[in-house]
């Protein structure tokens, strides 16, 4: 491996999954405590949560590269830099950013061509779903990223909803990078009357019955017709391959069900 990093710590899941998809999982020596995909990566030492890290564990692994995500890990990254480690922090918020992250990760470990090919395949899969849904009715979608306060979906999620054939009800918020900038009121959700509600609460299970029981929401089309669904956060709120594959497939399946007149309520 010579000139490229061979002992990589990944502080979030999407870079780990990317390295495994590139056939470079043996380089990963430490992972996030929330690691799910791929299953074999869960056997690696767990060194961090999203907002904190165990620096002694990281140091014991002697990494030659540490990968993180977003401003929320800025303090962790700063401390690791002070301790002398090379750190790359990504900040992808859109589908295009996610594909770029994959290409950069590949470049960092010396397999840029494989990474470009992987990004190309993922882009083709997204385009294929877009083609299938083009011209179909587009149900109004409220993607609920958090329940208290109510937070609408981040940009890559809203773009996936669109690719899957839905119409996000808060398109004006898609470019807001921070969760607090995407807070919406329950009354405004009611006013915009989504035909489907898709919820994904990072770190906890969605309670669809609680969504349905919110004051005044009985008049919302999604509630009235039983179209409230959950997608696990590991499949849609991680800005990496999982969102572009399994997340998109689940969104597509839900929206196809909503378009079908005989569709019934399902709360996975």
Image (cartoon, rainbow, N blue to C red):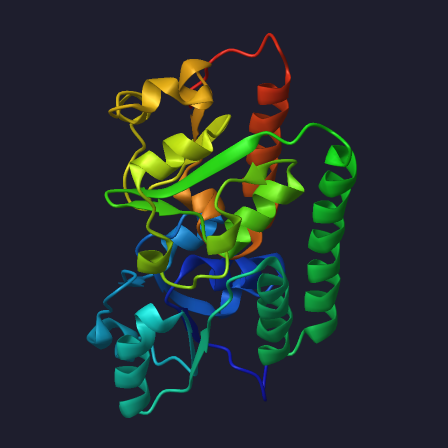
Residue 68 x, y percent position in the rendering: 40, 71
Residue 31 x, y percent position in the rendering: 37, 62
Residue 196 x, y percent position in the rendering: 49, 27
Q: Residue at x 29, y 27 (%)?
A: 207
* Image: 97 above or below 192: below
* Image: 108 above or below 193: below
Q: Residue at x 46, y 50 (%)?
A: 40
Tell whether 134 sits left or right of 40: right
Between 122 and 60, the one nearer to me in the picture: 122
Q: Indicate the quadrant containing the N terminus: top left, top right, bottom left or bottom right.
A: bottom right
Q: Residue at x 40, y 43 (%)?
A: 233
Based on the displayed image, in which of its 4 quarters is residue 253 positioned?
A: top right
Q: Residue at x 60, y 7 (%)?
A: 262
* Image: 235 above or below 132: below
Residue 75 x, y percent position in the rendering: 26, 78
Q: Indicate the quadrant containing the C terminus: top left, top right, bottom left or bottom right.
A: top left
Based on the displayed image, in which of its 4 quarters is residue 197 positioned?
A: top left
Q: Is residue 246 visible?
A: no
Number of on-image labels: 0
Q: Is residue 153 visible?
A: yes
- The residue positioned farthest toward the top in the image shown: 262
Tell whether 155 sits left or right of 102: left
Between 114 and 156, the one nearer to me in the picture: 156
């Amino acid at each position: 491996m010579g000139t490229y990093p061979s002992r990589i710590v990944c502080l979030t899941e999407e870079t780990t999954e990317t390295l495994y998809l590139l056939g470079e999982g043996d380089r990963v020596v430490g992972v996030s405590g929330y690691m799910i995909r791929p299953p074999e990566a869960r056997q690696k030492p767990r060194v961090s949560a999203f907002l904190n890290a165990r620096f002694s564990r990281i140091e014991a692994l002697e990494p030659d590269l540490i990968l993180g995500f977003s401003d929320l890990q800025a303090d962790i990254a700063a401390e690791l830099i002070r301790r002398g480690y090379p750190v790359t922090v990504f900040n992808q918020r859109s589908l295009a950013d996610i594909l770029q992250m994959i290409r950069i990760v590949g470049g960092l470990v010396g397999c840029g061509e494989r990474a470009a090919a992987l990004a190309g395949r993922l882009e083709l899969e997204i385009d294929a779903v877009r083609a299938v849904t083009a011209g179909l009715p587009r149900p109004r979608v409220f993607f609920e990223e958090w329940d208290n306060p109510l937070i609408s979906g981040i940009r890559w999620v809203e773009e996936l909803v669109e690719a899957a054939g839905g119409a996000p009800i808060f398109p004006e918020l898609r470019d807001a990078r921070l969760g607090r900038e995407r807070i919406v009121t329950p009354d405004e959700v009611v006013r915009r009357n989504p035909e489907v509600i898709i919820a994904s609460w990072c770190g906890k299970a969605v309670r669809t019955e609680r969504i349905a029981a919110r004051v005044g929401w009985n008049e919302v089309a999604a509630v009235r017709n039983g179209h409230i669904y959950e997608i696990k956060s590991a499949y849609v709120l991680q800005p990496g391959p999982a969102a572009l594959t399994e997340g998109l497939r689940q969104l597509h399946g839900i929206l196809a069900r909503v378009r079908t007149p005989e569709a019934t309520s399902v709360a996975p």
